[in-house]
Amino acid sequence: MHTKDLTLVSLMTAIIIILGLIPGIPLGVIPVPIVLQNCGIMLAGLLLGTKRGTLAVFLLLLLTALGLPVLSGGRGGLPIFIGPTAGYLFGWLVTPALINLGLKFVPQRGRILWQLLSVWVAGVLCADLIGTVWLTFQSHIPFLTALVSNLAFLPGDTLKVILAYTVAKALSAQHFSQNALL
């Protein structure tokens, strides 16, 4: 990996960590808060592509596992990976790859709308589904209950998709990276 790649991965990981400084909003229905860090995860996939975006997320999760307080609310440590939010973290790890896979199949007609939909499916629905499956297993919440409780995330996550997409488009237009949005 080149120095430029390492720098981009490190900077994206730092951005995701900074987004974690903004405290999560507890829902009360499920033990998973609304956080801004997933916007950074989608941004990593959009700006850095599959390999580097996934590496940035992996680095975040590695720092978390080592005990650094890099997740929203200053959380970190190995117990995070068996707690109720672990499935969402595992979902984050595959999000950059799923985003870029989906963008490969976007038709030219209505391109922007299809790109947004592709990012939304990968960055929101897939990550939430993985999180829901884990939450069902870990917290002994019925699957349907956990799935329905994720509806509370959809409006905010949709805004995060639009924000990540807009930022990535603006930075891609300035030749920040070479990815599917160019």
Image: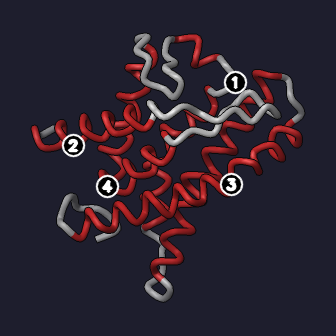
How would you rate the neighbour count of disc 4 (Cα within 10 Å): few for under 14, some for 14-19, many for 20 or more? many
* 88 relative to 124, above or below: above
Dot 2 amino acid type = Leu
Q: Which mark is residue 8?
A: 2
Q: For the residues marked 2 and 1, what is the alpha-carbon distance in whole angstroms?
A: 30 Å
Q: For the residues marked 3 and 1, what is the alpha-carbon distance in whole angstroms?
A: 19 Å
Q: Horizontally, is 86 left or right of 41 in the view?
A: right
Q: Which residue is mark 3?
A: 154
The mark that comes first in sequence, 2 or 4, is 2
Q: Horizontally, is 155 left or right of 139 in the view?
A: left
How would you rate the neighbour count of disc 2 (Cα within 10 Å): few for under 14, some for 14-19, many for 20 or more? some
Task: Tell me whether circle 2 and circle 4 mark residues in contact (CB < 8 Å).
Answer: yes
Q: Which residue is mark 1?
A: 84
Q: Which residue is mark 4?
A: 47
Q: Horizontally, is 112 left or right of 50 in the view?
A: right
Q: For the residues marked 4 and 1, what is the alpha-carbon distance in whole angstroms?
A: 29 Å
The mark that comes first in sequence, 3 or 1, is 1
Dot 1 amino acid type = Pro
Residue at the (51%, 28%) spot, across then down: 72
